[in-house]
Amino acid sequence: MVKLDFKAIKSSFKTRKFKYGGYAAMLTASVIAILIVLNLLVGQIPAKLDLTHNRLYSLSKPTVDLLKNLKKDVTIYALFPTGNENPVISEFIQKYAEKSSHVKIKYIDPYKNPGFVKKYDTSGSGIDEGSLIVESGNKFRVINRYDMVDYSYNEQTGSTNVTGLTIEQKLTPAILYVTSDKSPVLYELKGHGEDTLISLGISSEIEAANYEIRDLNLLTEKSVPQDATAVVVISPKTDISDIELKKLKDYINGGGRVMFLMDLLKDELKNFNSLFESLGVRLEHGIVMEGDNNYNAGNPVWILPKLESHDIVNPIDLNNMYMLIPNAQPIVETKFKKRTITIEKLLTTTSNSWLRKDLNSTSLNKEKGDESGPFTLAVAITDKADTLNAKLRPRDAKIVIVGNATFLNAQFSKNVPGNLNFVVNALNWLQDKKDTLQIQPKDLTTFRLNLSTTQAMIWSVVTVVGIPLVILILGLTIWLRRRHL
């Protein structure tokens, strides 16, 4: 029979070993209890920290500012089958509701509510599952599911990959559109073989910036419509008539706003150049080639222009974007211009550039007869209002001229964000709008850590041998110290 020595047990509680061991056990229990309580408290806090690359789940400052000042109620309808909601889109649009009490999120099953979806299908082509409908009052805008992502196309494999999220890029302008009392109207000049915003594949981006696009034929219209915010001329293939020239001049002289994007043609468009010369500039016939490899994209005719200081290009520079202008023609200032006219350079080349006059030449090197740079590829022109006669010109006339339109082709505008940003910024400048929505796509690029063989070996030794060895030495030291307590 085993007898318990209660006296010995009692005295063991008074030893130094028990005291230190008790303190250690109590400290361990306290730390565990504190961690459990903290974990429970943190779980109740709704705030989340976005540690993703490019702040994937965070709203940009322009969006936050817009939501903060929102005065009208906005409803975002997410078209998803019940129980099959997209978690990325759901979490992102919820951020809008968290920032403003005026924003409500509603999920609609398009298969159970076909009548509801049909109300917003103005084109009759249907609205895809996964799309969003933004509505305020009697205005709405549909954001197609495929417009909420950026794609890249692999020519070798023929496959497409999602490279970025553009949810915020589409959703914020849509909220601005449905809550605005009036949208600015852009008139596209027609009748001379021009490209259009639709044919270039960028009409949705321009409409997303809150612009309404209409056609303009100056042969049938008496003048540029009074509701025109600006007129856009994109790569005309033939010249305007004398009648059209007069109507454009009258519009500009009355304080009109125009953007000309002019591609190089075999023959000069004399009436267009006559209009430009009345503004203090002209288009020089020839192709600009850039010899500085830091300012071309591997080919002298694919120019990465220098961004000068101006409201149109400053946001592009601040967002670390660049532009790519192919086959550009230079813009040259004339010797004489009106005192009221101010010409500001937007895009320029380096002193290593040259102008190729012989359009039949295929050489990529500077040849005899080529003119040396630098050259100007885009300008912003302001013709001051008439202070003595406000009826003659009540406001400043503003004109943007670019010696190229090809930079807006899908090949460039979809892969070089700065190109499209330039156009949107130019349109905003033309209408004296400074609160532009500079929202960039959320990049989904995965960044890998590439290690050399030596680096991999060093880190293997550190993790497999070094760290366990340090822990072993620390543990042995503590054990030896406590062993003699």
Image (cartoon, helix red, strand yellow):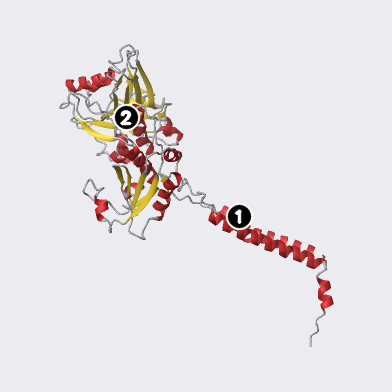
Q: Which mark is residue 84?
A: none
Horizontal and vertical percent position of residue 287: 31, 28
Can residue 155 be seen here? The reply is no
Q: Nearer the viewer, residue 318 or 453?
A: 318
Question: How far apart are the alpha carbons under marks 2 and 1?
Answer: 52 Å
Q: Is residue 321 above or below residue 48?
A: above
Residue behind mark 2 = 328
Q: Residue 10's image quarter?
A: bottom right
Residue at image position (82%, 80%) is 5
Horizontal and vertical percent position of residue 100: 43, 44
Q: Circle 1 sits in a helix, a strand or a loop, which is it?
A: helix
23 with respect to 283 (left or right): right
Q: Nearer the viewer, residue 181 or 211?
A: 181
Q: Amino acid at mark 2?
A: Ala
Q: Does the residue at mark 2 contact the one at mark 1 (Cβ under 8 Å)? A: no
Crowd around label 1: few <14 · some 14–19 · many ≥20 (10 Å): few
193 with respect to 284 (left or right): left
Farthest residue to the left: give it.
220
Farthest residue to the top: give it.
388
Q: Circle 2 sits in a helix, a strand or a loop, which is it?
A: loop
262 with respect to 65 (left or right): left
Q: Is residue 210 above or below residue 53?
A: above
Answer with mark 2 or mark 1, whichever residue precedes in sequence. 2
How many callouts does the rendering have? 2
Residue at image position (15%, 27%) is 220
Q: Nearer the viewer, residue 300 or 13?
A: 13
Q: Amino acid at mark 1?
A: Ile
Residue behind mark 1 = 458
Horizontal and vertical percent position of residue 424: 35, 34
